[in-house]
Structures are given as structure tokens and as C-alpha cells.
């Protein structure tokens, strides 16, 4: 396993729709392991392949935050939202590709998602709460959409300028 660098917005790869994963190869399994290590190290609760520069429909997540609970690392390959609730929730979202920037985003409170597991079987689960927000946020990444795309243009531009400044500072360091 190896940590991978996380792309920082603006980067054209973050706005590109990811391609479906065809074969679950050793390379795909290694990518999933690396992404989990990268996500936990960041620390974050979700990470999509485009965030590490791989334009494949793969995401990892683990929304367990309680110290007394065992981690629940999940790898979702080619995830598809099959159902959304009419009820919505508002969460303050952040993103590993947009560090230290947060904003309230409204999304369906519950979603049902199907995906392929690392062993090639199809899985399905209904998510709610933080899990629902996280899986929708990460699937958005696979579609080339960021949480700031839900914000008003002025706020989105302000955050983008902060990220451009951060990238310039990192390039000089």
C-alpha cells in the first residue's frame, strides 16, 4: 500500500467524468488499497479515484467516527444511485481536494446505491445520515462535480481563488 498525492482544485481531472471500471485487476485492487490508506491518512471519510488522478469509477469511504467502533472501509466500483428519498438533509461538507473550505450542501437524506465489490459481486445498500452525504459527494466526483458546484457563483469563485493561491504557495515551497 502507498499513499497517493491528492489533487487540489482547480485541476481539470477533477471536472472530468470518470470511466467505468471494466476488469477488477490487481491494479484496481492496489488502487483501492492505496486510496484507503490515503483517505485515512488525510484524514477523510471518502475519496474518489479522480482525486488521486485516476479517471475510473471507484470510490472508498468509511464514515465510522466513534473511537469504540471498528472501522468500516468500503470500496465501491461503478456505483450507481438507484433511489433517493424525497426528504433532504443539510450537512457542512468539506473535500480533501478543497482543503480547509466547508459549506452547507443540501442532498437527499437517504439513497440506495448498487456497486461492484473487489471480488466482482454486485452489492446494494441503503445509506442515510453522514453515509448518504458521503456516498453522494464521492459519486459526484466520479461525474466531475465538486461540492462547491452547489454553491452560489460568488462563493464558489472565492473558494477557487483560495485554492489557486494555495497551489501557488505549494509550488514555491
Image: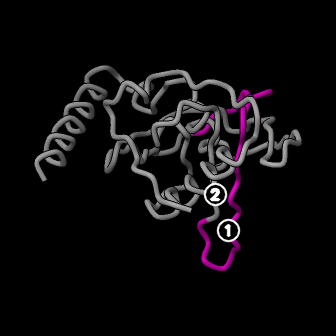
Q: Which residue: 13% across, 54% down?
A: 173
Instruction: List the single residue furthest toward the front.
Output: 26
Question: Magenta region: which residues?
Answer: 65-89
The picture quadrant where one finds residue 71 is: bottom right
6 left or right of 164 in image = right
User: Which residue occupies 20% across, 35% down?
Assistant: 164
Identity of the residue drawn at 42% across and 48% down: 96
Residue 77: in magenta span: yes
Q: What color scheme is it?
A: one colour
- In the rendered view, does 19 fall on the left or right side of 152? right
Q: Is residue 133 left or right of residue 147?
A: right
What x and y, as percent, mark residue 88? 64, 33
- Residues 111 and 172: in front is 172
Please tell me which residue is depicted at 52% across the width and 36% down the height of the picture. Answer: 54
Contact (Cβ within 8 Å) of mark 1 with mark 2:
yes
Instruction: Say what secondary structure mark 2 lies in.
Output: loop
The residue beneath circle 2 is 62
Instruction: Give me the disc on residue 152.
Output: none
Residue 165 placement (x, y as % from top left)? 16, 39
- SS at badge 1: loop
Report the residue marked by disc 1. 71
Residue 75 appears at what percent x and percent y?
A: 70, 49
Q: Is residue 105 magenta?
A: no
**Looking at the image, which is closer to me, 62 or 131?**
62
| Quarter of the image with the N terminus in it | bottom right
In this picture, is 85 found above or below 68?
Answer: above
Amino acid at each position: 500500500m502507498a499513499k497517493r498525492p491528492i489533487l487540489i482544485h482547480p485541476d481539470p481531472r477533477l471536472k472530468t467524468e470518470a470511466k467505468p471500471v471494466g476488469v477488477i485487476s490487481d491494479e484496481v485492487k492496489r488502487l483501492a488499497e492505496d486510496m484507503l490508506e490515503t483517505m485515512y491518512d488525510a484524514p477523510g471519510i471518502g475519496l474518489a479515484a479522480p482525486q488521486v488522478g485516476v479517471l475510473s469509477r471507484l470510490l472508498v469511504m468509511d464514515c465510522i467516527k466513534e473511537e469504540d467502533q471498528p472501522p468500516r472501509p468500503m470500496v465501491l466500483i461503478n456505483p450507481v444511485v438507484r433511489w433517493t428519498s424525497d426528504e433532504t438533509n443539510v450537512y457542512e461538507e468539506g473535500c480533501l481536494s478543497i482543503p480547509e473550505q466547508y459549506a452547507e450542501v443540501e442532498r437527499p437524506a437517504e439513497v440506495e446505491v448498487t456497486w461492484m465489490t473487489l471480488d466482482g459481486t454486485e452489492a446494494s445498500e441503503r445509506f442515510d445520515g453522514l453515509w448518504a452525504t458521503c456516498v453522494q459527494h464521492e459519486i459526484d466526483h466520479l461525474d466531475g462535480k465538486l461540492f462547491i458546484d452547489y454553491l452560489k457563483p460568488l462563493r464558489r469563485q472565492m473558494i477557487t481563488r483560495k485554492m489557486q493561491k494555495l497551489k501557488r504557495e505549494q509550488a514555491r515551497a
